[in-house]
């Protein structure tokens, strides 16, 4: 563990981290819980078998015996588009207790998906967000946080090229009337800091649509899986389209060039 800390200290000195690049340090424990502290005037030390992270904002201690990893994190920024929904996979520990943005974990079944409201979110946890269309910087917390709900969402901190394993990402249906998870075509890039559902099967006909979400967080919300088997058409970004014009599309799971 001391070796890990020495590497961290050396990395801070070597990289000369600027506030515009990395703003936080996240500490992850062996149980998956995380804590995120600001790098501003941050000092790290080892005292009585604990890592001490201190600055003017906080003074946190972490038992070395339960420390798993540490990584630098950028500001947790997210854009919620006009559809009012987005996904996030952040390097920061979040506390949305007082935020206008609502967060949910997702549990996928054979014919439905269940969304559960959450406010305290460990780093590197895939979540679904709901709110007014705008750009947000979400609140970070140094309080050690563990996930208390079942969650089938994964995510990526870097751009990820989807393959044939069955990546489902948040999008609109072809009519633009529903929001849900649809299959991402192999070779399409999933942007950094986005969450997705990784299924055992890749079926472009399946669209997991969001319906009747309770944004007040009064309970569990259900998503219904809809099998639109007739002429399911997707563009190369994984979004369903109603009518295909010129270009390359995925029609019923097959790549088709329309001239």
Image (spheres, helix red, strand yellow):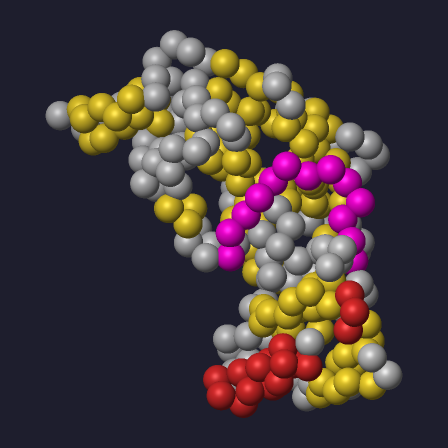
Q: Residue at x 60, y 69 (%)?
A: 71
x and y percent of residue 25 in the render? 64, 73
Give left or right: position of 192 versus 52.
left
Q: Looking at the image, which is closer to me, 138 or 44?
A: 44
Give left or right: position of 234 versus 202.
left
Q: Main SS type for the magenta part?
A: loop
Q: Residue at x 64, y 23 (%)?
A: 109
Give left or right: position of 50 versus 76.
right
Q: Is residue 22 magenta?
A: no
x and y percent of residue 47 in the render? 83, 85
Residue 185 seen in the figure: yes
Residue 237 seen in the figure: no
Farthest residue, direction left: 259
x and y percent of residue 82 in the render? 52, 41
x and y percent of residue 182 in the render? 47, 29
Q: Residue at x 44, y 26 (%)?
A: 202
- Give above or below for 111 relative to 79: above
On-image quarter of the C terminus: top left
Q: Residue at x 51, y 77 (%)?
A: 20
Q: Write the start and end of the magenta stretch as one range.
A: 145-157
Farthest residue, direction top: 230
Q: Report the label total.
A: 0
Quarter residue 56 falls in: bottom right
Farthest residue, direction right: 48
On-image quarter of the N terminus: bottom right
């Amino acid at each position: 563990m001391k070796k890990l800390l020495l590497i961290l200290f050396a990395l801070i000195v070597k990289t000369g981290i600027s506030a515009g690049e990395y703003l936080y340090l996240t500490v992850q424990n062996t149980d998956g819980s995380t804590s995120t502290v600001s790098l501003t005037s941050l000092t790290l030390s080892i005292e009585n078998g604990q890592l001490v992270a201190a600055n003017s904002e906080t003074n946190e201690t972490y038992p070395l015996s339960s420390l798993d990893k540490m990584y630098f994190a950028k500001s947790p920024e997210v854009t919620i588009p006009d559809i009012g929904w987005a996904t996030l996979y952040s390097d920061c520990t979040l506390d949305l207790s007082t935020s206008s943005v609502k967060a949910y974990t997702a549990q996928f079944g054979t014919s439905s998906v269940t969304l559960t409201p959450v406010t305290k979110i460990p780093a590197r946890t895939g979540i679904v967000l709901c709110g007014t269309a705008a750009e947000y910087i979400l609140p970070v917390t140094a309080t050690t946080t563990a996930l208390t709900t079942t969650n089938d969402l994964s995510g990526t901190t870097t751009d990820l090229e989807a393959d044939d394993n069955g990546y489902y990402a948040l999008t609109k249906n072809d009519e633009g009337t529903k929001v849900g998870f649809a299959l991402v075509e192999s070779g399409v890039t999933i942007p950094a800091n986005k969450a997705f559902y990784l299924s055992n099967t890749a079926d472009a006909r399946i669209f997991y649509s969001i319906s009747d979400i309770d944004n007040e967080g009064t309970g569990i919300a259900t998503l219904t899986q809809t099998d639109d088997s007739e002429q399911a058409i997707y563009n190369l970004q994984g979004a369903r389209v109603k009518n295909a014009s010129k270009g390359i599309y995925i029609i019923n799971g097959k790549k088709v060039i329309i001239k």
